């Protein structure tokens, strides 16, 4: 890759981050192997993400989540991950939003990016993070009758017997 | 030339193009040579299933090459691949939609036991929830193994089949089978406490 096509990496002194800090106050950011991460408070995540969209990060690549239960040095239980990209300038930015039990809640970004609809439904399904303002917060991959959020670290790998909770058909049943 | 004793002369001579058999045997002979598979292919076993039906392995040699995607037109369900919680009600519904007499082959490690997918969403063997006649080991099994299972199933149909389907009516057939019986369950399995077996036994006793 030559210099002209190499993506310009936003450093912690990136104008977008400066503008974010100007709007939200001091923000925590770091760079690792050319990837910049910024942490936004859960209460102000919508505000921050809207600002980042206005600053050129127009593409929402993914919404994901990490459960930091029993993770060494973790201060919060869940860490949401928003992967943003600026299609005009080919820059990328990782936004982290941390939430905690008992009611992990964050504002839905569906009004900003329609792509967030299913992504947030998946995070709700598997981690139980509630997205307020989501137009249709149903489970995405697990059956609708499922009650747990199976990617939480305190959920057993083999489940709680849901996979065996079905009627048994014999030859009598036709 | 067949010679049968009986009748007024004591001997009944049959012409060369006639032979005597049981009606059950005739039904079995027809059924086993025209199995119509229902391909319930959910994973990589389905690729081997397709290869089995294709020209190289040529399932037509055994009269079972016509895969139908409507359960109404099938009598052999081949479950090829892992079945998850969300898929199992579909599997059961399709099984119920198939006409009798019908058979089921559990193809591969995942369909038979869950395979390596011992997780919250994967059913640990379809035989926990629907009747299974043949298990094919392998991950995935070679087409030859599936063909062997079909040949074995043909033998089974010829051996135990009846024209009215009485063979499905036995306690052994009614019992819920398991490819993998977990240790704790092994200790608790007891025919005297199995309601299905007990129900069957009482019905059999009633008929006798």
Image: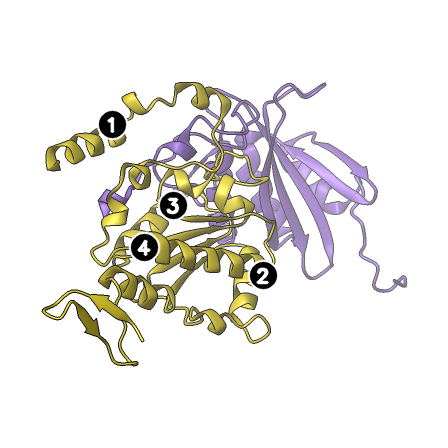
Is B173 placed left or right of A27 in the picture? left
User: Vertically, is B152 above or below B34?
Assistant: above
**Mark found first going from the N terminus, 2 or 4:** 4
Instruction: Name the residue that disc number 3 marks.
Output: B88
Question: What percent of the width, then of the height, locates residue A98?
Answer: 60, 29
**Mark found first going from the N terminus, 3 or 1:** 3
Question: What percent of the width, then of the height, locates residue A123?
Answer: 51, 39
**Both labels 4 and 1 in a single chain:** yes
- Contact check, label 3 and label 2, Cβ < 8 Å: no
**Mark found first going from the N terminus, 2 or 1:** 2
- Which residue is pictured at 30% across the width and 67% down the height? B73
Chain of the residue where label 3 is placed in the rendered structure? B
**Mark found first going from the N terminus, 4 or 1:** 4
Instruction: Name the residue that disc number 4 marks.
Output: B94
**Both labels 3 and 1 in a single chain:** yes
Q: Residues within 10 Å of mark 1 (few under 14, many from 20)?
A: few
User: Vertically, is A149 above or below A51?
Assistant: above
**Both labels 4 and 3 in a single chain:** yes
**Mark found first going from the N terminus, 4 or 3:** 3
Instruction: Name the residue that disc number 1 marks.
Output: B195
At mark 4, the secondary structure is helix
Chain of the residue where label 2 is placed in the rendered structure? B
- Contact check, label 2 and label 4, Cβ < 8 Å: no
């Amino acid at each position: 890759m030559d210099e002209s096509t190499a993506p310009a990496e936003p450093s912690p002194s990136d104008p977008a981050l400066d503008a974010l800090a100007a709007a939200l106050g001091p923000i925590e950011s770091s760079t690792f192997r050319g990837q910049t991460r910024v942490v936004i408070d859960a209460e102000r995540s919508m505000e921050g993400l809207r600002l980042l969209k206005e600053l050129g990060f127009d593409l929402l690549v993914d919404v994901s989540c990490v459960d930091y239960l029993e993770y060494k040095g973790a201060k919060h239980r869940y860490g949401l991950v928003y992967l943003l990209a600026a299609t005009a300038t080919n820059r990328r930015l990782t936004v982290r939003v941390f939430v905690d039990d008992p009611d992990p809640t964050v504002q839905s970004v569906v009004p900003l990016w329609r792509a967030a609809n299913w992504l947030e439904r998946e995070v709700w399904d598997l981690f139980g993070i509630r997205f307020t303002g989501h137009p249709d917060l149903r489970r995405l991959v697990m059956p609708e009758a499922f009650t747990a959020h199976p990617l939480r670290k305190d959920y057993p790998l083999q489940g709680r017997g849901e996979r065996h909770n079905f009627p048994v058909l014999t030859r009598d049943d036709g | 030339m067949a010679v049968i004793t009986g009748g007024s002369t004591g001997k009944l001579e049959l012409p060369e193009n006639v032979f005597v058999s049981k009606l059950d045997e005739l039904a079995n002979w027809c059924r086993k040579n025209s199995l119509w598979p229902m391909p319930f292919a959910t994973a990589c076993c389905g690729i081997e299933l397709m290869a089995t039906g294709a020209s190289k392995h040529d399932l037509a040699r055994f009269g079972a090459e016509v895969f139908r995607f409507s359960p109404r037109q099938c009598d052999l369900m081949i479950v090829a691949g892992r079945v998850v919680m969300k898929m199992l009600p579909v599997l059961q519904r399709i099984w119920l939609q198939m006409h009798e007499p019908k058979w089921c082959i559990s193809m591969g490690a995942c369909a038979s036991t869950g395979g390596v997918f011992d997780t919250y969403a994967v059913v640990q063997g379809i035989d926990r929830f629907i009747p299974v006649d043949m298990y094919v080991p392998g991950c995935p099994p070679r087409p030859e193994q599936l063909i062997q299972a079909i040949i074995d199933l043909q033998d089974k149909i010829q051996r135990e089949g009846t024209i009215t389907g009485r063979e499905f009516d036995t306690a052994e057939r009614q019992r819920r089978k398991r490819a993998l019986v977990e240790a704790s369950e092994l200790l608790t399995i007891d025919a005297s406490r199995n309601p299905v077996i007990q129900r069957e036994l009482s019905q059999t006793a009633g008929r006798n």
